[in-house]
Image: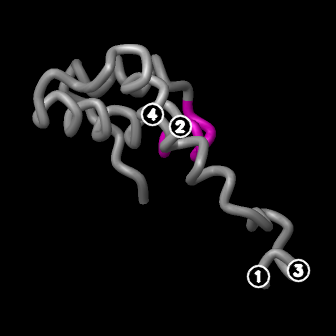
Amino acid sequence: MAFFSDLRVPFDNNAAERALRMIKVKQKISGTFRTEEGGMQFAILRSYIVTAVQQGLRPLAVLRNALAGKAWMPE
C-alpha cells in the first residue's frame, strides 16, 4: 500500500508483466530459443535495457556505452 503515500510507486505489477511479455513474444514467433544460453543472454540484455529505461536513460546510448566498455550500473 506504499502507493498511497508515494505516487512514484505503481499500484499494480504491470511493469513486471511487460518485462516478461517480450520473452514470450520472441518464443511465440521463433518457436523457442535455440539454446538455453541464448535465452539467458536475451533475458540479461532485456533486463538491462528495461532497468535503464526505468531510470530515464536512453536504451541505445546505454547499449552503445556498454559495448564500448563503459557499462552503466544502477545505483
Q: Determine the residue positioned at 85% across, 67% down.
A: 7
- Label 2 belongs to which residue? 21
Label located before the other in sequence (4 or 3): 3
Q: Determine the residue positioned at 66% across, 61% down.
A: 13
Label located before the other in sequence (2 or 1): 1
Judging depth in this view, the residue of 18 and 45 nearest the camera is 18
Q: Is residue 52 magenta?
A: yes
- Label 1 belongs to which residue? 2
Left or right of 4 in this view: 70: left
**Residue 24's disc number:** 4
Residue type at mark 2 is Arg
Q: Determine the residue positioned at 34% across, 48% down.
A: 73
Judging depth in this view, the residue of 51 and 64 nearest the camera is 51
Q: Position of residue 72 (x, y in %)?
A: 35, 40
Residue type at mark 4 is Lys
- Whether the residues at callouts 4 and 2 have beta carbons within 8 Å, the answer is yes
Residue type at mark 1 is Ala
Distance of label 2 from label 1 (alpha carbons): 25 Å
Element under disc 3:
helix
Q: Position of residue 53 (x, y in %)?
A: 57, 37
- Whether the residues at callouts 3 and 2 have beta carbons within 8 Å, the answer is no
Above or below, 73 against 3 in this view is: above
Q: Which residues are magenta?
A: 51-57
Q: Determine the residue positioned at 32% across, 33% down.
A: 45
Left or right of 41 in this view: 11: right
The picture quadrant where one finds residue 8 is bottom right
